[in-house]
Image (tube, rainbow, N blue to C red):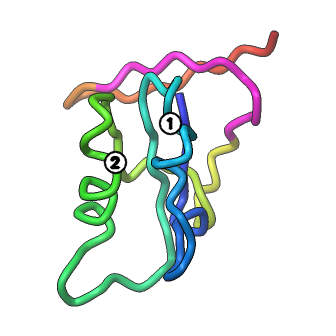
Amino acid sequence: MLVMSMSGASSPGRTYPRGCGFFDRANAILFGWSSAPGHSSLSHREAVLDALGSLSVPIIADVECGHVPPYMPIVNGAHGRIVHSSSRSELTQTLG
């Protein structure tokens, strides 16, 4: 599991982590909320799918974590189990 927020996005002239093997072991990607402004021609969701959609892993957007409330804590280095459906979303984290 990998969690990203918009503050981790690349800027012009920087290499996006996808090409550097950053996602090679990802089983899923959780994408948190952002206070960054959208762009008139591309929403945050569209940008994520454009950048990461070819990875062949589930991408779950609008997760209640990131740099805006409610700031759900996700422990760096923890193992996570995700259950996500139209009626339920749950993240269980374990250390070790």
Decide whether residue 67 is among the magenta residues.
Answer: no
Q: Position of residue 20 (x, y in %)?
A: 55, 46
Q: Position of residue 76 (x, y in %)?
A: 76, 35
Q: Are marks 1 and 2 in contact (CB under 8 Å)?
A: yes
Q: Nearer the viewer, residue 18 or 65?
A: 18
Q: Secondary structure at mark 1?
A: loop
Q: Is residue 74 left or right of residue 68?
A: right
- 10 Å crowding of disc 2: few (<14), some (14-19), many (20+): some
* Residue holding disc 1: 23
Please tell me which residue is depicted at 25% across the width and 58% down the height of the picture: 50
Q: Position of residue 21 (x, y in %)?
A: 54, 38
- What is the quadrant of residue 30 in the picture? top left
Q: Which mark is residue 40?
A: none
Decide whether residue 77 is among the magenta residues.
Answer: yes
Please tell me which residue is depicted at 35% across the width and 40% down the height of the picture: 60
Image quadrant in which the C terminus is located: top right
The mark tally for this picture is 2
Q: Secondary structure at mark 2?
A: helix
Please tell me which residue is depicted at 33% across the width and 26% down the height of the picture: 84
Q: Which mark is residue 52?
A: 2
Does residue 86 lie above or below 67 as drawn? above
Q: Nearer the viewer, residue 14 or 35?
A: 14
Does residue 29 lie above or below 84 as drawn? below
Does residue 47 lie above or below 40 as drawn? above
Which is nearer the N-term, disc 1 or disc 2? 1
- Under mark 1, the amino acid is Phe
Label 1 to label 2, Cα distance in Å?
A: 9 Å
Please tell me which residue is depicted at 44% across the width and 22% down the height of the picture: 27
**Residue closest to the far top:** 96
Q: Nearer the viewer, residue 66 or 77?
A: 77
- Under mark 2, the amino acid is Leu
Q: Which residues are magenta?
A: 74-84
